Image (cartoon, grey):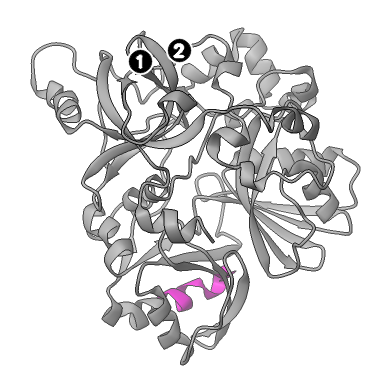
Amino acid sequence: MPESLQEAIDRTGSPVTLLRNSPARPHVFPVTAEFSNWRSEQHSWRTSCALLDQSHHMTDLFLRGPDAERLLSELAVNSFANFPVDRAKQFVAVDHRGRLIGDAILAHLDTDHYDLVGHPMVIDWAQFHAETGGFDVEFERDDNSIVRRGDPALFRYELQGPTAVAIVEKLIGGPVPKIGFFHMGRFPIAGLEVRAIRHGMAGQPGYELFGPWADGERVRDALLEAGAEFGLTPVGAKGYSTANLESGWVPSPVPAIFTGDEMRAYREWLPAARAGSLGGSFDSGAIEDYYLTPYELDYGRSVAFDHDFVGRGALEAMSEASHRRKVTLVWNPDDVEAAMGSLMRPGVPAKYLDLPKARYALYQVDRVLQGDATVGQSFDCGYIANEQSFVSLAALDPAVAEVGQEVTVLWGEEPNSAKLQVEPHRQVPIRATVAPAPFVQFARESYRAA
């Protein structure tokens, strides 16, 4: 039997120790890194249209049965009062104390048939309850291509950018049917019926097209042919991994699963190999200090107290309180340049800043300071060619979360952890300026408003 998460915590004595020194290999998107170059590929979703292959890096959990909706409703902060077939939503789950486990996309495919897709944190939580909760539900899990043997169940292609609508209109031979945000439709493409979710991951207009894996190559060929005159650009893993920095989505907050008696049975069920890794300069020995609430990542708009769900009482108690606010931090270019340049100078360099994404652990948590005071945490970080800026997403105390405030991100670990991604380095302070999240104006005014 593989070691469980609870056994691994007992062995190491601390969740923080376990995660900081995780032997997990660096995480990569299992698709082509670059088709041209990641800078031009980033530009494509702003100037023409990007084609992003989402078929390989996410995990699907297909749920069927009369209790499928009840299971999902009891785990989600979201309302299910108006969630018919051909609708999708961002599914947000918390622990019994209202702290975030994670989020995923939930698609209502057919009567009593759902697809929960995203990073494994929420998928594992839902599967645990499907197996152990006494629900009349069947499930099928389709892991990402890093761990799965064989082909995915579905192809999933994202079209996003100003010419996305024109490409779809050419493919279907007429005007695109009006589909609301996170609503689903069906398009005739290359003689096939292809399902589409209306949304956009980088804050640009777009569609997520999906269907049986066997149809994927035929659909992709049709997309590339129709999109040629509209600047359709295949985007590889490097470029795609940065799209969230523009739209303001934090992909992997530390899930609130490592403590609490209520979560012990889950930790005994979950393989330790799926625990993840922790990096960054935030250095508390208490894993609870890394947990977040939905309100701190701007998910308060999704919390609905019209149904019973795990953590409802805790979220009700904290709903009126003041919370840290999600922001974008724009890193000072001189300080970023100095950190990168330290590789060329004698002495111990700063922690390597990879481009375009510099996150070096599944859970990246860096300390944010104003003066000597800790005022928040910085998460995913990287370079946006469209803005010529190095940025991170962060949760800051309300008093310092106003646009234009000056803060400092402490970059690097002290002491250096034993993760494979960590080389000998020294910590360096990097000045940063508070900006909105989402950072891009189009995303703030159009994408988020929808």
Q: Which residue: 55% across, 44% down? A: 147
- From the top left corner, tell me how far across and down residue 253 is, in percent: 53, 33
Is residue 81 among the parts visible in the rendering?
yes
Secondary element type, mark 1: loop
- From the top left corner, tell me how far across and down residue 89 is, in percent: 64, 57
Q: Main secondary structure of the magenta part?
A: helix
- The residue that mark 1 highlights is 413
Q: Farthest bottom residue?
A: 173
Q: Which residue: 29% across, 78% down? A: 230
What span is colored magenta in the figure?
A: 210-220
- The residue that mark 2 highlights is 283
Quarter where residue 378 is shown: top left
Q: Which residue: 80% across, 23% down? A: 262
Q: Which residue: 39% across, 42% down? A: 436
The quadrant of the image that shows the N terminus is top right
Name which of mark 2 and mark 1 comes first in the sequence: 2
Q: Amino acid at mark 2?
A: Asp
Quarter where residue 183 is shown: bottom right
The quadrant of the image that shows the C terminus is bottom right
